[in-house]
Amino acid sequence: MEAGIVGLPNVGKSTLFNALTSSVAAQSANYPFCTIEPNEGIVSVPDSRLSRITEFIVPQKIIPASLKLVDIAGIVKGASEGEGLGNKFLSHIRQVDAIMQVVRCFEDPDVTHVSGNVDPIADIDTIETELVLADMQTLENALPKAEKTARSGDKEAKLRVAAIQKCNAHLESEQPLRTLELPEAEAAAISSYGLMTAKPILYVANVDENDLAGEHELVQRVRGHAQKTGAKVACVCAKLEAEIAELDEEDRAEMLSDVGLEEPSLNIIARETYRTLGLQSYFTAGEKEVRAWPVPIGSTAPQAAGVIHSDFERGFIRAEIYNLDDLEQYKTEKEIRAAGKLRVEGKSYIMQDGDICHFLFNV
């Protein structure tokens, strides 16, 4: 699964992307459309539970979960009608699973704002409007074919028509589709359309280095908007984080202490993006490696096993599971088993965040 970083030009998208992916590429110039093809990068998801596990199970290597980020060029008003290479940019957004929208919440006369003044809510509305218009166009183009097929009695086509009509009505009220609840069957019938306003979103407030906690009125306005639409907000000073990312570990710790941060804000961004994608982690732990595996929330044990290898899912027999509290109490898997705390779970088991697992399978 992957998340796309979007925003108006010059809000700090590429600076944030480069910092998140520890890119050594030069920072983008202060010009709109400096990123035309989307850059892609893999980001590790920091998880303190990994180091806690390795206090008791010492591995040869530690592997955190990771996610894929796509840096998508700045969107401008009129993108849904092709302005500013809009069609190309929108096609990139259709392909991702979640959206990270960077909104500028800092004043800087040296960094030009595309609309002339800093207003994060206006920026959010600009992009949301373009995505709403693009989704409406997608649905309007799809409706005639769906109606024609539905007239032949095709059940899935009838579901598709019903879903399109509901979605169009919702979009006409200027509401994103992520705030519309559709029956599961109807949602599945239109899932191939890549509707952009249906994707979960995380607002990333790019703040000034003197407002790392995001107390400025501009950030509060973003939080208010997010609360109304069921979205989350994370704060980051992309410029500062880019500087921190370039330091070695010792200097990084010193700089974090100097600015009053316990960890880089990028860690928080990575974890919030992970949650926005609807992911949670389970762990495998042994002498070879301790590893966090990403799995969609609500996945069954066989589905989780399939993340490791498709054979694990195909030949799934059972899972042996314990949790970190058990490990910290009993110190070894042997003692966990002796205490009766090692659970045996079957095919219907729903994975819980933080499960430590052994999968038994036979192909």
Image (cartoon, rainbow, N blue to C red):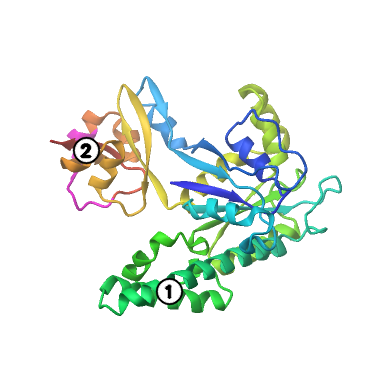
How far is the residue under mark 1 from the one under mark 2? 41 Å
In the image: residue 229, left or right of residue 148 = right
> Which residue is under mark 2?
312
Q: Amino acid at mark 2?
A: Phe
How crowded pointer 2 is (Cα within 10 Å; few <14, some 14-19, many 20+) is rated as many
Q: Which residues are magenta?
A: 336-350
> Which residue is under mark 1?
143
Q: Residue at x 44, y 78 (%)?
A: 165
In the image: residue 318, left or right of residue 155 = left
Q: Residue 262: x, y in percent?
A: 62, 37
The image quadrant where one finds the C terminus is top left
Asked which quadrant contains residue 224, the reply is: bottom right
Say if 233 sits above or below 55 in the image: below
Q: Which SS class for mark 2?
A: helix
Task: Give the camera-side residue of 215 and 224.
Answer: 224
Say if 167 sits above or below 259 in the image: below
Task: Give the camera-side residue of 164 and 6.
Answer: 164
Task: Give the camera-side residue of 108 and 134.
Answer: 134
Question: Of marks 1 and 2, which one's residue comes earlier in the chain?
Answer: 1
Q: Residue 310: x, y in percent?
A: 24, 39
Q: Amino acid at mark 1?
A: Leu
Magenta stretch: residue 362 in it? no
The answer to whether residue 262 shows anywhere in this view is: no
Which mark is on residue 315?
none
